Each structure stands twice: as C-alpha cells, then as structure tokens.
Amino acid sequence: MKQTVVRDLNEALRRCLRADERVYLIGEDILDPYGGAFKVTAGLSTEFPERVVATPISEAAIVGIGVGAAMRGLLPVVEIMFGDFLFLAADQIINHASKFPGMYNGQVEVPLVIRTPMGGGRGYGPTHSQSLEKHFLGVPGLRVVAPSHFHHPGLLLERAILYDKMPVLFIEHKLLYPLELHADGFAQLTVEQVTGNENELYPTAVVRNFRGLDVTPDVTVVTYGGCSRLLEEALLQLAQEEIWVEALLPAELSRTDFSLIAASCMRTRRLVLVEEGTGRFGWTAEVARTIAEKVCSRMTINMVSIEAPPSVVPAARDMEREMLPSAQDIVKGILEVMS
Amino acid sequence: MTVPHDGSPGKLQPAARLEEEFYRQMYTIRRFEETVLELFSKGLLHGTAHTCIGQEACAVGVINALDKERDIVFSNHRGHGHYIAFTDDVEGLIAELMGKINGICGGVGGSQHLHRGNFYTNGIQGGIVPVATGMAFAEKVKRTEAIVAVFLGDGTLGQGVVYESLNIAAKWSLPILYVVENNQYAQTTPVHIAHAGELRRRAEPFGIFTKSLKAEDVMEVYSEASSCVTLVRTEQRPAFLYLDTYRLGPHSKGDDLRPREELERFRARDPLLQFADRLNPDIRQDIERKVQARIANAVKKAFEMPSESFGSYRQRMVEKGVYVQ
C-alpha cells in the first residue's frame, strides 16, 4: 500500500502514544468513529481512550490547557481543526506558550505541539482556506514546522512531540493529506534530506529534476509545505525542456539560517520564491531579505516571487484557482528568471 | 482551640500561633507593597507594579490552605502577595523588581512575570486560566493529588477564555480552585460599569461548587478556603471561591481617582488593622519590627546586586534552546 501523508502522520501519532505515556492528544472531533476532520487521528481514541481527549469548541482554552499540561510534565498534542482558527488561540501561543521559557529565565519548558491544517484548493472559502502561518513567524520562542510530501511528515511530527522542547506549531497543508510521500524521490526527481548538524530535528528537502544527469542546476526554487505538489508538476515539466532546477524546502519555517539557500543561489544566480499565502511580509520576503544582505552584495541574483495576491480566498472554484499559485505559475517564474 | 498548620496534615499548632504567623505574612505583604510604592515615588524602581494593599487576607487565607510542598499557584499581574504568602521569598522578589541577576527570574520577568517552584504568574488577563486548568489536568492524570489554585480579579471575569476553562474543568472534573478577588475595580472601571448579573455566581451554571464571602477576616478566608481545598483534592473536581475585597492602594503607581470618602470608608475597615487589634500588642510590635528590618535589609542588599547584560541573558537562552541563534 502507498504511504500517504495522512497515514504517515496518523502512524506517527500512534507510535508516540505507544512510546510515551505522557503523550496526550487534545482536540475537537478527534474521537472515533469520526477520527478528526481530516482523519489524522483515526483509530487512536479506540486504542488510547484515556489519552485522546475530545473538547468543546474552545480553541483558546484547549491550547492553554496544552500549555499548562506541557509545563507540568506531559507531552500534549493539540489539534486545531482549521488553521484559520489559530487566531482564537493567538494569545496562548504568543503570550503564554512561547513566552514562559524566556520570561521565567529558562526555568521552564513548554514541549507542546499544535497541529493544524492550512491552505486552500478545496473551495472552503475565505475562513477555511488560508495559509496564515506567516503571522506566527518571528515569534521568539516558537517553532513553526511545515512538512511537504518531499519530507517524512510523520517522522518530523514524532520529533516535534518526543524530542523538541520548544512549543511547535505544526502546519499540515490540506491538499497534501492524500498524496503519496515522495521523500525518497519520484521519476526524474531526486530528494535529499539535508540537515546542518546532527541536533537539527527538521531537515530541508532538496529536490532536483536531473536524476542521473551530469548537469548543474540553472535555477534555485525555494518554497515550503503544500506548494511541494505544485513544485513536483513544474519540475517534471521543466525536465522535459531540459531546464535543471534545484528546489529547497526547509521543513522549519522559523529557522533563520538560510545558508543552504544562499549557497544554491550563488551557484545558479537565479532564485524563484514560492508561497501559497497572500504575499508581502511573508516567509519568502524574509528569505529574500537575507539573500539580498548576504548574497546580492557580492553578485547579481535574478529573483522572482510567486504568491497569492492580497484578497480573501474565494469559494468559487475557478476564482480560487485563479488566485492561488499554480504549477504553471512556477514554470512561468522559472522561465522569467532564465530570460 | 487548634487548627491544622498549613501544608502538614496532622501537625497541629495553637490558634494563637497561627494568627501570629498569618499576621506576620499579611504585614510582610503590606510592608513590601508600601516599600515598592515608596521606591517608585523616589524613582528607584523602573517599570511598573500592581500592589495588593488591602487584599492581604485573600492571599494569606487562601494560600495557607494549600499544601505548599506540592500544590500549584497561578497568579496574575497583582501577584506579589500571593508570591510572598506561598514562598516567603521577600529577598528574591525585591531583587526581581529591581531587575537584578539574583531576582527569581533574573530580572527578566519583573513584577508581573514570576516563577519559582510551583508558583507562576503572567500579566495577561484571563490567559492564565486555561494554563492553570491544563496544569490541573496534568496533575490529575499523573495522580499526584496536587491541586492548582488560580487567582483572578473581577475585571478578568470579562474574558471569554475564563468561561471556556470553567466549562472544561467541570466537564473533565479537574482539581483546580478558581479564586476570584473582587476588589471592586478593574484598573479604574468599577464592577457595576463592566459586568451584568452576579459575579459570585459565574461558575454555578457549570455545576462548579461555589463559596463566596467578604474577605475581611483572614481566619475566615482560611477556613473557607481550607474547605474548598479539601473538596477539590478529595473529590478531584473544581471549586470557585469568590472573595469580596477592596484595593486600598492605586491600580499601579499613581492612577487613583476614586472618591476620597469611599477610600476613607474602606481604610477604616482595613483587614490588616482589624486583625492586628486582635493580637497581643507586644507580639504585634515584635513582628512588625522584624518584618520592617527584614524588608529594609532585602532592599539594601538588592541595590548592591548586579544586573545581567541582555547579551549574556540571550546567549544563555540560546544555549538552553529557548531561542534560536
């Protein structure tokens, strides 16, 4: 059977529950037979009735409860049904979970994981389709992790739950759930999981579309999370046209070490930045700033950003499709920096 | 008559001794808070603080009903009194307020962000309530029999997350005591402008056991709080202790616009002075002298302590994994 993203996450949660009795899953509608709005927790409440806990619709309280439980020795995993609802718990994330360790002078840890699906493409409309993770980037003391289908999402989730002492916001793109994992490559695409050092929990997936060929990449693409599905289509198409791409997808969005990205665009001198969220002030803007500071002072980099324009995400299928970045937008962006 | 000593079931001590100890704690809190305001007025303290002058009976009465060895206290912006009643650590607290390296949070937290052992505070109204509720969840599933006491004010009853927490605590039957100190004002807003209905009954619709009283006599607060603590611990379910009190000092430093007559009326009923009148005058004087000397000494010592540089603090936090490089 093919390993899908949703099954990979589900198995990781089961492994964590089996491995450590301090692990608790807390969230709305996560019990069987429903098993969560996106089925990530399916089967878990049956196996662990005491440690999979259903809650009322109270995002602020359940994240707060996760924070308190984490400070008193549990390893709670809170599910927020849609990422759009995270703002109900923003005070808990910004002024509590990520504040306590630093403001108490390092005397406490908050090993909490908040999982939530983000992203559009399913016609859920303005308040159930957003990619809002950018608002939680730059919060000191908060880790933001967004796996793609080029990562091992379950492995990353397991590390967040069992080994990360920081509070982690774990972003799962809705459209990735049914996809097959391509963490070890697919067709002409090779995938390498790169970490800076052995303590790093969340690797950058480096995807190249020239398997077995002795060529150097023409373009660097940087993106994350759910855009991996668009990237895959774009890279396979460009391989037909003999345009060689090296794409980097950091799993940890809150990391500020962009040295891998800098090294790649110093080789290609061409950079395409892609994110699904509404652009401006986003994660790719931070990447661009760093590249401007570290690289552009030494050489010219041809750079293009692809992102959604500032707008609500329309519910209507064609309007939503027109708004959100597509594989063809990535192809166009790559051709643009090549010209 | 004898009553149980705080925190050590079975160990009894004479009521007179307990009253003296409670007076010592209340007077320590009062003298500490007055000292804080004096230091601010002389420009010797930086930042802000919220004092609990007039509310000492709440802190001492409730916190001495807890088991200080294992129970957890989560307090708010007005938390000096709770901290002193729980830890007796005047020295660490004044150093913290002065931003010194030996402060309980190295001077980083300051007045509103305290933590030592099982004691925590945060300066966001309401946000601490689900966190405290989550701590009660953890203690329950770990079967430690520890309980949590979380302190909130009348103003915080305007926050929705408080009711989310009450609902879940009742539904999950969590060992937590919600303590409301209604000091009649949210900063400058009197209760009657802010709230509809009866504050004392806010937890009743959730099926949470509620006790309400006027917190003028510390012995009465202690007795009622002890009953609540016993219920929460033995029945592993929440309780709601509602205390009517009055803040005799300003909200923070110099922002008091309340009518003079009202203040005078409450000053005449100052719970600390009423309690002092019940003690042997010699004993009372002895307690006050010792407390004054201790606080003066703590202030003097704190002045001599160094502060840490921000660079050194941040480096330590990065090494601990709190922040990324």
Image: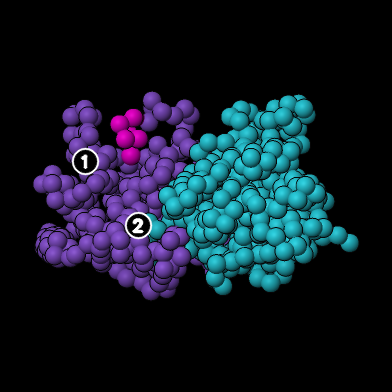
The kind of residue tagged 1 is Lys
Q: Colour of chain B?
A: purple
Is there any visible trace of residue B159 in the rendered image? yes
x and y, in percent, of residue B214 in the image: 35, 43
Task: Answer with the quarter of the image where residue A187 lies.
Answer: bottom right
* SS class, disc 2: loop
Q: In the shown orientation, is residue B315 left or right of residue B241?
A: left
Q: Position of residue B100 (x, y in %)?
A: 23, 61
Quadrant of the snapshot with the C terminus of chain A: top right
Instruction: Examine the rendered structure and indicate whether residue B17 appears above or below residue A132.
Output: below
Q: Is residue B77 left or right of residue B208?
A: left
Residue for point 71% across, 41% down? A331
Q: Amino acid at mark 2?
A: Leu
Q: How is the image coloured?
A: by chain
Q: Which chain is cyan?
A: A
In this picture, is B49 found above or below B64? above
**Residue positioned 48% across, 37% down in the render:** B159
Which residue is at 29% across, 52% downward? Answer: B111
Q: Is residue B233 magenta?
A: no
Label 1, label 2: how many angstroms apart (C-alpha)? 19 Å
User: Please, which chain is the residue tagged with disc 1 on?
Assistant: B
Q: Which mark is residue B253?
A: 1
The residue pinned by badge 2 equals B114
- The chain ID associated with circle 2 is B
What residue is at 24 percent from the left and 57 percent from the top? B99
Task: Give the mark nearest the N terminus, 1 or 2.
Answer: 2
**For the magenta stretch, what is the residue range?**
B183-190
Q: Position of residue A263 (x, y in %)?
A: 54, 59
| Residue placed most toward the observer, A89 or A300 | A300
Q: Dot 2: few (<14), some (14–19), or many (≥20) neighbours within 10 Å?
A: many
